[in-house]
Image (spheres, grey):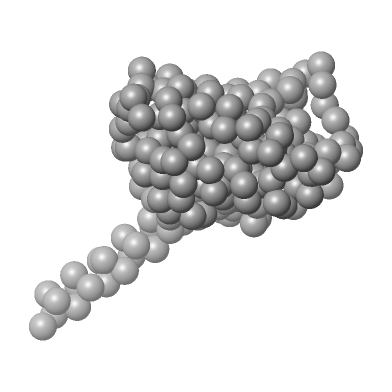
Amino acid sequence: MKNRLLKTESRIDFKSKQDEFAAFIRDPENNPMPADVNGQRMDMYRELFFNNIEGFLSGNFPVLRKILDDQQWYALAQDFYAKHACQSPHFSQIPEEFLDYLQNERDSSNDFPFMLELAHYEWVEMALSIAMEEAADYHPDLVNLLDQPVALSPLAWPLAYQYPVHKIGPAFLPLEAPEQPTFLIVYRDRHDDVHFMEITPITYRLLEIIQEQEKTLAEDCVRQVARESNHPNPELIVAGGLQILKELAEKMIVTLA
C-alpha cells in the first residue's frame, strides 16, 4: 500500500513539473522557470521548440512572413506559440492550427485587415499538395459535356475573398477591401502540381452549383446560372458556361460524376 502511494505521488509531481516546464517554454514572460532546473538548459529547450514552430510557420506562410518585419513576425509567432493549444501532434497540422488561432484567438488592432485571408490562401497550397485524393484521368466524354453529369474534382477548391490575396506582397498592402470580392480556383493537376487561377463571379457560382448538386447534368448547371443572372439573353450565358466547363475539364477541375 505504501509503495502505491509513493508511486502516485511521484506521478503527480512529474505531471506538475511537466506543466511548469511547458508553461515556461511557451511563455517565459508570464510563467516562472521551474525550480531546480538549469537556466541555460531551459533557454536551449525553449529556443529549440520555438524555432521548430517558427520554421514551419515561415515555410508555409512565405508571403505573410515577407510583408512583416522581424519584430512583427516573431511577435506573431510567439503569440501563437504561447496562446494556442494545438489539437494535433502532427507537424503538418501546424498551419491549420495557425489559421484557427488567427480566426479565434488573435486580437491585435495592428494586424493587416487581410491577414487571415492571406494566411488561408497560403494554407490552401500546402493542404492541396498533401491531400490524399488522386487526380482523375481525362475522359473522352468530357469533350461533349452538354448531356453529361459533372462533378467538381476533390482536388479543386473554389475560393472567395474580400481582398485580392493572390496579389498581396511587400509592394501591395491594401488596407481596405475593394468593392468587388476576389474569386479563385486552386487545383492540383495529374502531376501533383498546385495551380491558382482567378475566375469570374459567374464561374465561381457555376462551380458552387456543381459542388452542391451531385451528378447534375452540365446543361442544367449552366442554365441555373443563366436564370440567376437575369441576363436578357440567357442562351449567351449557357453557351459561355459550357465553354468555361470545357476549359475547366481540360484542367481536370471538372470531371464526370
Classify residue 239 as left or right of residue 33: right
Q: Where the N terminus falls, by quadrant? A: bottom left
Write down the quadrant of residue 73 in the picture.
Answer: top right
Classify residue 183 as left or right of residue 93: right
Viewer-closest of 147 and 127: 147
Q: Position of residue 96 (x, y in %)?
A: 50, 44
Q: Residue furthest bottom?
A: 1
Write down the quadrant of residue 241 in the picture.
Answer: top right
Write down the quadrant of residue 164 in the picture.
Answer: top right
Q: Position of residue 196 (x, y in %)?
A: 58, 24
| Total tally of numbered discs in the picture | 0
Classify residue 91 as left or right of residue 85: left
Viewer-closest of 241 and 130: 241
Q: Position of residue 220 (x, y in %)?
A: 54, 49
In the depicted structure, whether residue 19 falls above or below residue 144? below
Q: Residue at x 59, y 29 (%)?
A: 244
Viewer-closest of 251 and 186: 251
In the depicted structure, whether residue 210 falls above or below residue 73? below
Q: Position of residue 162 (x, y in %)?
A: 77, 41
- The answer to whether residue 84 of the structure is visible from this angle is yes
Viewer-closest of 23 and 199: 199
- The answer to whether residue 127 of the structure is visible from this angle is no
Q: Residue at x 79, y 49 (%)?
A: 230
Q: Residue at x 82, y 43 (%)?
A: 232
Classify residue 9 as left or right of residue 200: left
Q: Residue at x 70, y 51 (%)?
A: 227
Q: Where the C terminus falls, by quadrant? A: top left
